[in-house]
Amino acid sequence: MPEFFSYAHFKAAAAAIRETIEIVPKIGLVLGSGFSPLAEGVEDSVSFAYSELPHFPESTVAGHAGRFVIGYLEGQPVVVMQGRTHYYEGYSMAEITFPVRVMQVLGIETLIVTNAAGGLDPEFRAGDVMVITDHINLIGMAGLNPLRGPNIDDLGPRFPDMSQPYDEELGAIARRVAQEAEIPSHQGVYICLAGPSYETMADLRFLRTIGADAVGMSTVPEVTVARHGGTRVLGLSGITNVLPVEGGPVVETSHEEVLEAGKKLAPRIETIIRGVLKTQ
């Protein structure tokens, strides 16, 4: 399990892709649990299984197909991660962020990240979309930061600023598209936990207290690496369930529930992403 990769590793994976395609992707997309169908809409596409590409981690979680899909969406050249890997699968932070680095070497300028998340704000409802305005890097604060180790100066600075991880202009466009399409949407703060176990009631009380509006087990490492490399980021959380409040009824959370909610959320997330791409 590699703890660190060099620039040469990223270039090797990018070179394997460039042997097959001539498209220079402008926008990268990371599709979370249940959102894979969007990749089927990519036109003139070429796909690569993660297992076919040098150094790529392979997803082991249901709902994550594990493919790189490159082509055009709403006329924009895109590279789509149809499924991601997670820290809880046993991979290092360097491994789970490896595909984003390869996207950067391929030439992306913007990254759109999506995830399935539990709603911490009691105003949220299952099926809503949250445009991420900021995040809390709880696992990064504890030492699991994907930028740990030798810095690659060709990609970004040793100490990158993270005061504005999500692009305000892209967020405003996403909210406008959602409003025009009558998609229930919010904006808020996403917090990333290591997983794979879901939260205790004490965990949820703590997360709400420190200002989180939605919780999941991904995205923040990818965004950290993207911003380190100067890539603009739009983040979208599909709220699959609203987590219980203290004193309320006990509701068990399951991955099956998350995937089922994703079926309702997938067309909403797709509508927003396509609407944003039309403006780029």
Image (spheres, helix red, strand yellow):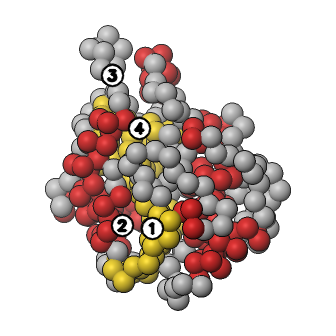
Query: Whole-Å distance between the Cαs marked 3 and 2?
Result: 31 Å
Q: Could you tell me residue 20's position as x and y percent?
A: 54, 84
The residue under the point 75% across, 59% down is 5
Quarter of the image for the C terminus: give it: bottom left
Q: Are marks 1 and 2 in contact (CB under 8 Å)?
A: yes
Determine crowd level at label 2: few under 14, some 14-19, many 20+ residues with C-alpha closer than 10 A: many
Query: Whole-Å distance between the Cαs marked 4 and 3?
Result: 17 Å
Q: Which residue is mark 3?
A: 252
Query: Whole-Å distance between the Cαs marked 1 and 4?
Result: 24 Å
Q: Which residue is mark 2?
A: 39
Is residue 243 or residue 24 the one in the foreground?
A: 24
Q: Are marks 4 and 3 in contact (CB under 8 Å)?
A: no
> Which residue type carries mark 1?
Val
How many numbered marks appear? 4
Determine crowd level at label 3: few under 14, some 14-19, many 20+ residues with C-alpha closer than 10 A: few
Q: Which residue is mark 1?
A: 80
Q: In the image, which is nearer the foreground, mark 4 or mark 3?
A: 3
